[in-house]
Image: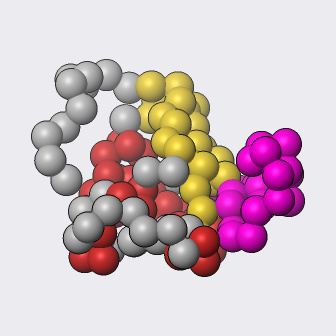
Amino acid sequence: MGPAPPTGDDRFDVVLCRHLVWTLPDPEAALREWAGRLRPSGRLVLVEGRWRETGHPYVEGAGSLPWNGGLGAADLAAAVRPLVADLRVEPLSDDTDLWGGPVHDERYAIIAHA
């Protein structure tokens, strides 16, 4: 995953990630790291989506990323669920105020509790 965040052994009330996990070479390691940084009452909030449907390329070589193009809410929830006490998925695709208009891909938030 690369170097650990420069936060030492600090724990946090919230770890927030938006539109990032699909760009990581080892997203499962990142999820473990982030969940491990939560205080006992902390939350992990992931705003993500499945971008492949848009047809927009990311960067050259992105095809080798494990979650290139994003992944559906059910798949990301399955990856996060063993790391947390509970989680819920909030669908976001239909909320045009969030995106400036209609979107045609799956967008969602996962809110997980330590």
Residue 106 is drawn in which quadrant? bottom right
> Which is nearer the eye, 84 or 21?
21
Where residue 78 sits in the image (x, y, percent)?
53, 72
23 w.r.t. 9: above or below: below
Residue drawn at the location 21% of the way across and 25% of the way down: 6
Residue drawn at the location 38% of the way across and 26% of the way down: 11
Work out whether residue 114 can be spotted.
no
Give the colour scheme of this rendering: secondary structure
> Which is nearer the eye, 26 or 114?
26
> Which is nearer the eye, 102 or 26?
102
Residue drawn at the location 74% of the way across and 70% of the way down: 104
1 w.r.t. 34: above or below: below
Tell me, yes or no, whether the highlighted magenta stretch contains residue 90.
yes
Where residue 91 sits in the image (x, y, percent)?
77, 60
50 on left or right of 109: left
20 w.r.t. 68: above or below: above
Work out whether residue 37 can be spotted.
yes
Tell me, yes or no, whether the highlighted magenta stretch contains residue 99.
yes
Residue 50 is drawn in which quadrant? bottom right
> Which is nearer the eye, 36 or 26?
26
- The range drawn in magenta is 86-108
86 w.r.t. 70: above or below: above
Residue drawn at the location 42% of the way across and 45% of the way down: 35
Where residue 5 sits in the image (x, y, percent)?
24, 32
Where residue 18 sits in the image (x, y, percent)?
53, 44
Count up the numbered dots.
Answer: 0
